Image (cartoon, helix red, strand yellow):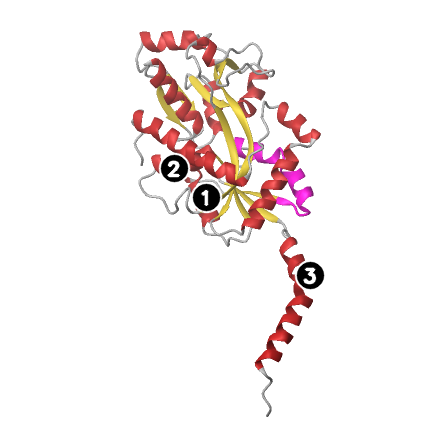
Amino acid sequence: MTLMPFQHIRLIAAAALAALGPQLVHAADAFPSRPIRIISPYNAGSSTETFGRMLSMEMGELLGQPLVIESRPGAAGTTGAREVARSKPDGYTGLMNASIQVMYPGMFRSLPFDPLKDFAPVGVFGFAPMVVVVSSGSAIMSFKGMLEQAREKPGKLSFASGGLGSLPHLVGELVNLRTSVNIEHVPYNGTGQAMTDVAGGHVDILYASVASALPLIKAGKLRALAVTSKKRLELLPEAPTIAETAIPDFDVSSWYALWAPKGTPAAAVTRLNQAMREASALPAVQQRMQAYGVVPSHLTAEEFARFSTAESAKWLEVMKRARVEPN
């Protein structure tokens, strides 16, 4: 048997790679080639899912493959987050979660994943100011009046949020810290039940996204006391800002984002982020977002990574100051 000279083998291999080059490039550019599964770690109809669905259909059209949203509720969202963290990092599984994702270390002493290190930040679905609401039958008529009553009766008022460590919860704690009042937090596993109980007068106050609270405000079941943004909202023009009412420079918005498992190819992350930003720029999507007071995101994946890290540090400090003990 005659052995082929090594130089000839190299030439043949090079020719083969050159011939396959276009196919390899095409394969790399083909992402996605099948539907993408997006896990929402809360019950169907949650605020998080509402935000994601504002542009998920258009994202799917831009990607050429649908985004299939699945609910995996449990343990303040960590059940669904754990499933994504353990999924194959190929770009076909993502986590749709609120800012609570970067605050889990302040909520739980032990986690089955690292909220920052075990995920690849993809992008933000949108930013939205929150609204402070009470039951339409409540004696609290204004945000200033709420604070006055809280000072007169320390510990008697309560505020609800959609989850321990969620941004609405921490906004309530930040208000407590900035105004030196003591309004007790009542956590719920999701915003829906929290709104129901506040509307029914079982809890005094609720901090929630405008998107989730607006239907009950319009229906006359909830009264808006203030919004958390720097400027008033067109959707709630009569609701003053917390900044103009009681706390100068107060400006906080809720945000909802997409993460992939750690190790997901950078090309897939970039493609998903590009689709998010392109979808956010479409007139139909912008109109949809404006109807809920949502501000589109223009953050790249790299910018979102830096933003989420900064948000984690900021709000974990608030949790520490508010003595929010992890479970």
Question: Would residue 38 be counted in the magenta stretch?
Answer: no
Question: Would residue 59 be counted in the magenta stretch?
Answer: yes
Highlighted range, magenta:
47-67
| Residue depth check, mark 2 versus mark 3: number of the one nearer the observer | 3
Position of the N terminus, as image quadrant, is: bottom right
- The amino acid marked with disc number 2 is Tyr
Disc 2 designates what residue?
104
Q: Residues within 10 Å of mark 3 (few under 14, many from 20)?
A: few
- The amino acid marked with disc number 1 is Ala
Q: Is residue 143 above or below residue 289?
A: above
Determine whether label 2 and label 1 are within 8 Å by CB. yes
Quarter of image, res 234: top right
Disc 1 designates what residue?
81
Residue 98 place in picture, x, y as percent:
48, 34
- The amino acid marked with disc number 3 is Pro
Most common SS among magenta residues = helix
Q: Residues within 10 Å of mark 1 (few under 14, many from 20)?
A: many
The answer to whether residue 92 of the structure is visible from this angle is no
